[in-house]
Structures are given as structure tokens and as C-alpha cells.
Amino acid sequence: MVTKDYHIPLYHKIYEGNTNDVDSFSKIVMDLKEKRDLLCKTENQKNKFILIFDSGNVSETNMNIINECNLKFISKLKPFNYKEL
């Protein structure tokens, strides 16, 4: 987590290299939500918080957690086969 201006670090998380990103991401999202809630005192400030992640962290579980935490996000979603629908 960094500030918009000057990219000052506010939070980081290092996890073991043998851990799958998609499995670790839900814990990181919860940590980020807690940090956001501590740092942002108003709803306006919370609405400026944007989570950015790549498609390696996308799963139905993680997207549900992001929605439950009411977080805005930017991500590349995993492509899927329309024929599977």
C-alpha cells in the first residue's frame, strides 16, 4: 500500500515463495482493508482507496471477499472460454 502522492509505503507483506498467489491473496485483502479502515477516517477517503492486482490473484473466493469488503479494484481478469457457459 502506497500513498497516491509520492508513493510513500504504508504497508507491505512478504510471504513464502512456495505459496500460491491466489491462496495468499484473501489474507492480504483482509489486511489491506483493516489498514485502510485505520488510515481513512471518512467514507470519502475510503472511496479513494483502490486495490490493484493481476489475474494470478483472481478467484471466485477472492472476488467475493473484495466485494464483501466494499473495495474498489483494478485487475486483469482471467480469460475464459465462452463455450463453457
Image (spheres, rainbow, N blue to C red):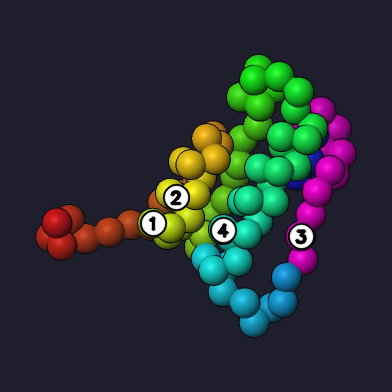
Q: Secondary structure at mark 4?
A: helix
The first of marks 3 and 2 along the sequence is: 3
Q: Which residue is mark 3?
A: 13
Q: Secondary structure at mark 1?
A: helix
Q: CA distance from mark 1 to mark 3?
A: 22 Å
Q: Which residue is mark 2?
A: 63
Q: Which residue is mark 4?
A: 26
Q: CA distance from mark 2 to mark 4?
A: 9 Å
Q: Amino acid at mark 3?
A: Lys
Q: Quadrant of the N terminus?
A: top right
Per the rendered image, the range of residues in magenta is 4-14
Query: Which of the labelled discs sits on residue 60, or is there none?
Result: 1
Q: Quadrant of the C terminus?
A: bottom left
The first of marks 1 and 4 along the sequence is: 4
Residue 12 appears at what percent x and percent y?
A: 79, 54
Q: Main secondary structure of the magenta part?
A: loop
Q: Secondary structure at mark 2?
A: helix
Q: Amino acid at mark 1?
A: Glu
Q: Residues within 10 Å of mark 3 (few under 14, many from 20)?
A: few
Q: Nearer the viewer, residue 65 or 79?
A: 65
The first of marks 2 and 4 along the sequence is: 4
Q: Going 60% across and 42% down the picture, which residue do you hit?
A: 51
Q: Is residue 41 left or right of residue 9?
A: left
Q: Is residue 69 visible?
A: yes
Q: CA distance from mark 3 to mark 2?
A: 19 Å
Marks 1 and 2 close (CB-CB < 8 Å): yes
Q: Residues within 10 Å of mark 4 (few under 14, many from 20)?
A: many
Q: CA distance from mark 1 to mark 2?
A: 5 Å
Q: Going 48% across and 55% down the picture, which residue do you hit?
A: 62
The first of marks 1 and 3 along the sequence is: 3
Q: Nearer the viewer, residue 17 or 28?
A: 28
